Image: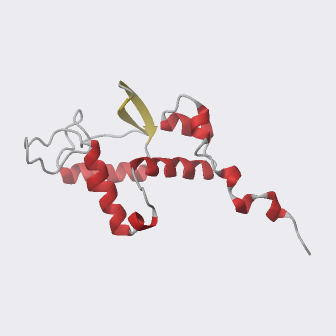
Amino acid sequence: MRVFYPVCQVAELAAGYRYTTYLPLHVTAQRLIDAYLKDAGHAEDLKGPLFRPVKNNRTKTLAKPLHPASVYQDIVKRYAREVGLAELVPGLCVHSLRATAATNALAHNADIAKVQEWLGHADISTTRMYDKRQSRPEDSHTFKVQYD
């Protein structure tokens, strides 16, 4: 059985370089991943990819990572259509989900340096683009003034 600790190791490829990131793993996410692994039948394969294709008509090999296009076409777009987001959010993509997660974390007072590390940004100014806390109209000083 795959045992998860408070962090999850993620191997990524960016700008031609392969690197490993360690991300915090929420208890609920751990429970759902454990259930997924059991249902998918590859809970014992600790070295293989976590998420795999469910079918492969060309090579029949399933012990490989999902192709990035499959993640977008088969998962993100499908579920966005099912819940009505595809119509509400033109241009919805994997990156917009990542941006929403970062913006949401910052809006809930996450440390910007931790969000920077989480996103893998080399420069904190890139992470600041997701910080909308200062640009929310309802937080403007204009609305703090009492007109009686």
Q: Would residue 118 be found to the left or right of residue 111 on screen?
A: left
94 above or below 80? Answer: above
What residue occupies the far front of the structure in this picture?
90
Q: Residue at the right extreme?
A: 148
Residue 110 picture location, percent across and down: 60, 45
- 8 over 102 or under it: above or below: above
Give residue 79's quadrant in the image. bottom left
Report if residue 108 is visible in the image.
no
Q: Residue at x 52, y 34 (%)?
A: 117
Quadrant position of the N terminus in the picture: top left
Where is residue 148, by image quadrant?
A: bottom right
* Labels in figure, total: 0
Residue at 41 percent of width and 67 percent of height = 87
- Residue 123, given in percent of the width and then of the height, sits at 57, 29
Compared to residue 139, the image places residue 68 above or below, namely: above
Between 105 and 81, the one nearer to me in the picture: 81
- The residue closer to the viewer here, 37 or 129, is 129
Q: How is the image coloured?
A: secondary structure
**Residue 91 locus on image (x, y percent):** 42, 56
